[in-house]
Image (tube, rainbow, N blue to C red):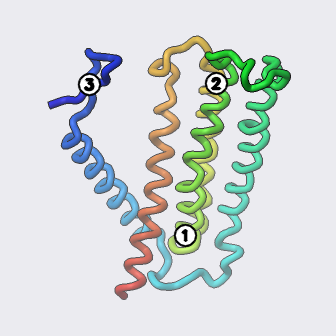
């Protein structure tokens, strides 16, 4: 049976069993990609890099660059949009029931970036420390570039339906990057533990 949203009687949702099957397919895929990263590019399992700072440096530079861009482009971008719309001059009780579209889109970008950060930051540093710092630096740079393109595209989506914005071309590769780094680090840790 399929569950439906009470507001949208004609819109079926994915049955729980099918959803679990899809999740297991993704877990399997990310495990295989993580294993490939661990076995092909990982250092000797159970060892740390000889020079931890040198190994982490590319990832540190990329993560710091992303955090600065997040602060200036996303966090401050919401504040600037609110300023342009006069929202900062209003009290909470005087705000309109429906948020301004530009402010809403910028807020969604900020929130989604924030939702993605823990997996990105932890995955990047675990992969750099346990697997390979250069590979983690390259993958995290790819992630940052995709996330900046995501943000730019979403901010300019005024008047478009969500399905026509084209965000999946940025978000899906980012999921692959982060989950592969996390799985590679986990596999590398297991390999080090059992050696």
Secondary element under disc 1, as helix, strand or loop, is loop
Quadrant of the frame with the N terminus: top left
Q: Earlier in the sequence, mark 2 or mark 3?
A: 3
Which residue is nearer to you in this view: 123 or 109? Answer: 109
**Residue occupied by mark 3:** 4
Which disc number belongs to residue 132? 1
Image point (74%, 31%), residue name: 78
How far across and down, in percent of the image, does residue 87 sit?
Answer: 78, 21
Quick check: marks 2 and 3 in contact, CB under 8 Å? no
Apparent side of residue 9 relative to residue 68 in the rendered image (left or right): left
Q: CA distance from mark 1 to mark 2?
A: 39 Å
Picture quadrant of residue 153: top right
| Residue 17 placement (x, y as % from top left) | 19, 43
Q: Earlier in the sequence, mark 3 or mark 1?
A: 3
- Describe residue 142's horizontal placement relative to residue 171 as left or right: right
35 in relation to 97, above or below = below
Which callout, 1 or 2, points at the residue further toward the start of the chain?
2
Query: Which disc is residue 184 wearing?
Result: none
User: What's the CA distance linking mark 3 and mark 1?
Assistant: 46 Å
Reading the image, the residue beneath label 2 is: 104
Q: Position of residue 126 (x, y in %)?
A: 54, 68
Residue sitting at x 50%, y 77%: 43
Q: Please give the name of the residue rendered at 74% of the width and 51% of the height, measured from the top-left corner.
A: 65
């Amino acid at each position: 049976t399929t569950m439906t949203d009470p507001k949208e009687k004609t819109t079926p949702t994915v049955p729980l069993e099918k959803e679990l099957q899809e999740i297991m397919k993704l877990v399997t895929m990310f495990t295989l990609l993580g294993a490939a990263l661990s076995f092909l590019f990982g250092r000797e399992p159970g060892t740390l890099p000889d020079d931890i700072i040198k190994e982490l440096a590319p990832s540190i530079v990329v993560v710091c660059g992303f955090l600065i861009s997040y602060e200036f482009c996303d966090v401050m971008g919401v504040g600037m949009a609110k300023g342009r719309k006069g929202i900062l001059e209003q009290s909470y009780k005087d705000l309109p029931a429906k948020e301004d579209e530009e402010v809403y889109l910028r807020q969604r970008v900020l929130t989604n970036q924030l939702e993605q950060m823990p997996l990105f930051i932890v995955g990047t540093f675990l992969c750099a420390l346990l697997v390979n710092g250069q590979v983690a630096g390259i993958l995290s740079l790819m992630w940052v570039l995709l996330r900046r393109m995501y943000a730019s595209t979403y901010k300019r989506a005024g008047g478009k339906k969500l399905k026509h914005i084209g965000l999946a071309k940025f978000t899906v590769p980012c999921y692959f990057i982060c989950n592969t780094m996390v799985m590679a680090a986990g596999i590398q840790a297991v390999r080090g533990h059992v050696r």
